[in-house]
Image (cartoon, helix red, strand yellow):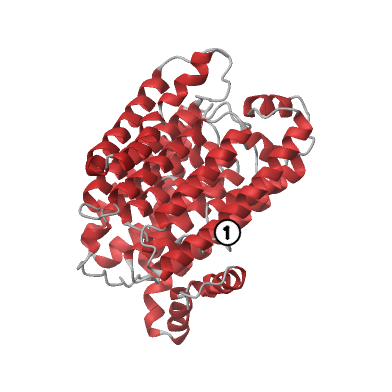
Amino acid sequence: MTITDLLLPLLIPLPTLLSGFVVRLLPNRAHAIAPTAGAMTCGMALLLTILPHHGDPGLFRFDTLSTVMVLLVSFLGAIVLRFSARYLAGDRALPRFLSWMCLTLSSVVILVISNHLLLMLGAWVATSLCLNQLLLHNPHRAGAVFAARKKFVFSRIAEMSMLVAILLLHAGHQTWRIDELVASIATGNHQGLAVAALLLAFCAMLKSAQFPFHSWLPDTMDTPTPVSAFMHAGIINGGGFLVLRLSPIFVAVTISLHALVIVGSITAAFGAIVMLAQPGVKRSLAFSTIAQMGFMMIQCGLGAWGLALLHLVAHSLYKAHAFLHAGSTIGAMPRAAVPLATSALALGVMSGTILVFLAVTTLHWLAPSAAMIPMAFHLILALAIAYGIGRAWSGHRASLTRALVVASGIVLSSMLLHTAAGFLVTGMTEHKAPAWLIVWVSFVFAMLFLFQSMLWRASSHPLGRKLYVHALNGFYVGTLANRLLGRLWPSRNHS
């Protein structure tokens, strides 16, 4: 490893890292310096990822995963910094805000290109601490302070779990480097993996707001919208990235992947139900993120690495746009529930099943070497198409033909993207999930489909009205977490 190999990757986070300090010295120019630094970081990421990389990767790594992640993070960071300068124009604390935002972006960039376990942990701690400062942008708000404390506690628990796992991995394999660790596992050395994999899975669950450790995420809605956008689009994906980066460890200890699937499916169902009852757009988006992170954990746990990476990118782009666009929903008329006829749902199920079956069969014939996608995801896609077609026919039967055409396009696009994503991760360790786990995931999403299909009747049924009240309050899991935190970290300003 040459000095050039060591220093060249540092050029990516360097502009925003320097900007984090310069904007404090030149506060009157902060609104121009920080967005420019963000654009430079994005440009450096693009430049260095297309350059050829040879020899020993050293402290930093530019494989497919890190390349996709650094491009995604730097692109979103540049957009959020530009948005922040306009969103907080006139705020006296703008230089401080942009400073911590730049430092947060730099930390995440280092995290995703790291090839060293201790460097990864250090970048993760730095990301969390910088984010904590952004959550405290309004320190006079008791809710914001309490949410920052909750995030702080959950993050420290996650990082302690990761530290113990790293120490166990080093003791068993005598290396801090991820590429050397993966090579050691490939030779059959599984020392320390059992406990380390479970600790890393626990860390991923905490970092990605999995049930029942999720309540810190919706509680951070007092923070400015740019922080929410970057947190939900980039930082929250850290758990999924951790599993993808260290996938050989999880594959060697299959119980850790099973735990991710079970917890992820519960989280996905919980987030999807609670999301529907939230009156505020930001809290609704927060629970949507929780559900999406649960779905990503399912993909990781089933060994669908390509789908997980595709989902990570798609969710990040969508959620960044959703938060930055959230202000335009003020004053919008809520959509009324569409009564779903049984015949419409039956037509939807039949159409969705046929379209997905034809697409899977065709793509398997055209690309037999493509990575096989677990059947549960085909079922989930078919159910999504079924609900869309059933809703379209129930709302306006004249749109049925259009709905079928759109559904066909969605199915074909999804299959093509899934196949392409599979080719991107051909070097990752394969994992074939057991049949009972596939059945479990299929059952959970089938129940969600039935629940959503009957939801329009909820307001007219006493049980439905009770369920709404409980869902509105997140089934009180967050309340319990708040009480525990209040005892651990009392605050006079919080009631």
Residue 55: give x, y in percent of width and height: 56, 12
Neighbours of disc 1 within 10 Å: few (<14), some (14-19), many (20+):
some
Residue 343 picture location, percent across and down: 37, 67
Q: In this view, does 84 lie to the left or right of 188?
A: left
- 438 sits left or right of 339 in the view: right
Q: Which residue lies furthest to the bottom in this view?
A: 462
Task: Relative to 444, say whether 70 is above or below.
Answer: above
* Residue 309, x across and y down, in percent: 48, 38
Residue at image location 54% in from the left, 32% down from the top: 371
Residue situated in front as seen by the camera: 249 or 392: 249
178 w.r.t. 382: above or below: above
**Does the image show residue 439?**
no
Can you tell which quarter of the image residue 341 is in?
A: bottom left
Count of numbered tags: 1
* Residue in the picture at 76% in, 24% down: 187
Amino acid type at mark 1: Val
Which residue occupies the foreground of this view, 484 or 130?
130
Q: Where is residue 68? Give x, y as percent.
A: 44, 32
Where disc 1 sits, the SS reads helix
Image point (34%, 36%), residue name: 19
Q: In this view, does 125 lie above or below 368?
A: below
The image quadrant that residue 340 belongs to is bottom left
- Whether residue 171 is visible here, answered yes or no, is yes
The residue where tag 1 is placed is 153
Q: In which quarter of the image is the N terminus?
A: top right
Say above or below: 54 vs 110: above
Q: Which of 8 and 74 is in front in this view?
A: 8
Residue appearing at x 50%, y 49% in the figure: 129
